[in-house]
Image: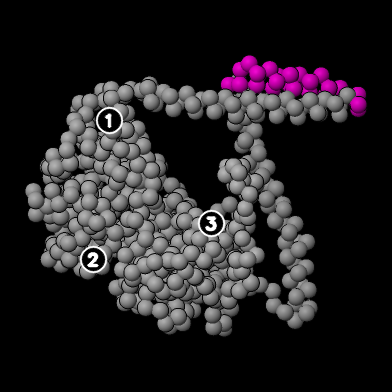
Amino acid sequence: MGDLIKKNLQGYKGEITYPEHHQSHAASAFFPGPFKEAAIITMDGVGEWATASWGVGKGNRIDLHSELLFPSSLGLLYTAFTYYVGFKVNNGEYKLMGLAPYGKPVYVQTILDNLIDLKEDGSFRLDMSYFNYCQGLTMTSDKFHKLFGELPRKPESSITQRDMDLAASVQAVTEEIVLRTARYVRRETGQRNLCLAGGVALNCVANGKVLRERIFDDIWIQPAAGDAGGSLGAALFIWHQMLGNQRDVDGIHDLQQGSYLGPGWSDSEIESWLADAGYPYAKMDEADLFDTVSGDIAAGRVIGWYAGRMEFGPRALGNRSIIGDARSESMQSIINLKIKYRESFRPFAPSVLLEDLEEFFDTDRASPYMLLVTPVRTSHRKELSEEEEKLFGMEKLKIPRSDIPAITHVDYSSRLQTVSAADNPRYHGLISSFKKKTGYGIVINTSFNVRGEPIVCTPQDAYLCFMRTEMDILALGNCLLKKEEQPHLEPEDENHSERRKKSEVKSRAELRKFGLIMAGAFAVLCVLLFFRNSSLLPWTAGLSGFFLLSALLYPGLLFPIEKLWMKLASVMSYIMTRVLLTLVYILAVIPTGLIMRLLGKKPLQLGFTRGMKTYWVDVDPEGPCSRPEKQY
């Protein structure tokens, strides 16, 4: 890694420092936050060996006190259920959170009795006999499947009530762990404010509960709470803690700049690109753009909104957003099925004017980064009939629950974003214009992408997404594009063709490399067979020549062979992993455990030890980043 850094930062001759994973998370939570001092909690899958940590930040320094260790991990527990319910690991956890309100937490006690030993201080240990992520290629074991009665749901198959109940149950357990940890950290640190980071901090339902229970006076969550935010944390840890640079905060405003930290394109650059591409558009001043687009939203059209610098983190916050009318009963399904191409149950977040927050939601707490869930105010809810109250599962989706149904989840909650004129004046201006027309200072906001694709970055990304979905209007800066005025986007569209050619070139290069490696391998084998005077020499020489000529003249001929080779390599890798793990257990783990028992010491307990008071362990004060003079 050091060589790679120095190669890309040509001329750099200084030291290279590697802050620990949870130190980086903690730094990303505290240093950009608004508090002069605060408690810090980090929770994720795993980093090095830690899976959670807590400590205190003061001024320009953070100190972590305790941590939980792998393999017991709240992030991996949640991911195990994500896998079991049929969603993609390390990608579908937010789907599981969105699915939870459709179910009932009927498996909570089953989880607490079998999978996890949870202490009052939020520490816990998992019974690893139910999981497979330490030694296998899946998250859950056969014992897990027997406990819950079935094999994991196949991806894209029908979601059952049992799946919804499992989602609700693990969400409830997650919330309980987070709440217990928060209470314990408040008691231990005496701090009034809390900063959160790590992948679990993206669970905005749990975040909302911590805030509503008033465990701390206030909380701040890193907008890029996952591993991407770790890069920011590592840089800030070195800048403040290791180099001693001061940190100036006022206790109210954070230093994240609205998280609009990505690349941006000016109006002149956008116009130049549109002109070169030949796409028709109308140039407007800002006031006319707001008036036109807000009218389109009110008329039920779906808008692609592209402006300013891209957001840093997984949430679109009004610069790379798809926008719709929150009052529409059909808008959630329209955007899910015709724009995002994703599951219909997935809820959408509202963007609400900060000054109108308490009009629509039962909170006075701003949420600029879409990381808190809060209830819709009772005055906007609709009463359900007795028959509607009895509905369960996906049937709940059909019933509008408020006068802003497109952003009201089945449990009357919303993952809201508050929009202030200070943080994003352009987006605030658009919603304000919509309010003038409708009386509602609130719209749907979802990320500008389709399922499986990253959020759009460039004007070209935005245009292609616009044309390949059923969006109606695209606002690129101050340029407005209407779908019906655009030329038909053929499969061989110039931009698409260029990307495909690049992909083909890359594919040919990879196949050529594969052919040359195979030719070289058979050539070495030829030499060995020559000295053994083997009858296989002509065949081996022929294969070497075949791979060499194919690589040089027609790499595409190697595609089926390379595909078969990769499958064989995957199978061999799987077998070798099992063999190596078995050898490690036989030659290292078992003898070590026997020796420890002979010495009267207990080996590492991967099951439960319910007699223990806590599973928190002290952070090593002599860790690799504890003494700056040794690092920099």
In front of the other: 182 or 77: 182
- What element does badge 3 sit on? loop
Q: Is residue 327 left or right of residue 513?
A: left
- Reading the image, the residue beneath label 2 is 375
- Reading the image, the residue beneath label 1 is 271
Residue 543: say if magenta: yes
| Residue occupying the point 49% across, 54% down | 231
Q: In the image, residue 316 lies at what x, y percent?
A: 32, 49
Residue 302: say if magenta: no
Which kind of residue does numbered mark 1 sit on? Answer: Glu
| Residue occupying the point 8% across, 48% down | 437
Disc 1 from disc 2: Cα separation: 42 Å
| Residue occupying the point 61% across, 21% down | 555
Which numbered circle lies on residue 139? 3
- Answer whether residue 80 is visible to the viewer in this image: no
Q: In the image, residue 116 lies at what x, y percent?
A: 51, 71
In front of the other: 313 or 453: 313
Q: Quadrant of residue 513?
A: top right
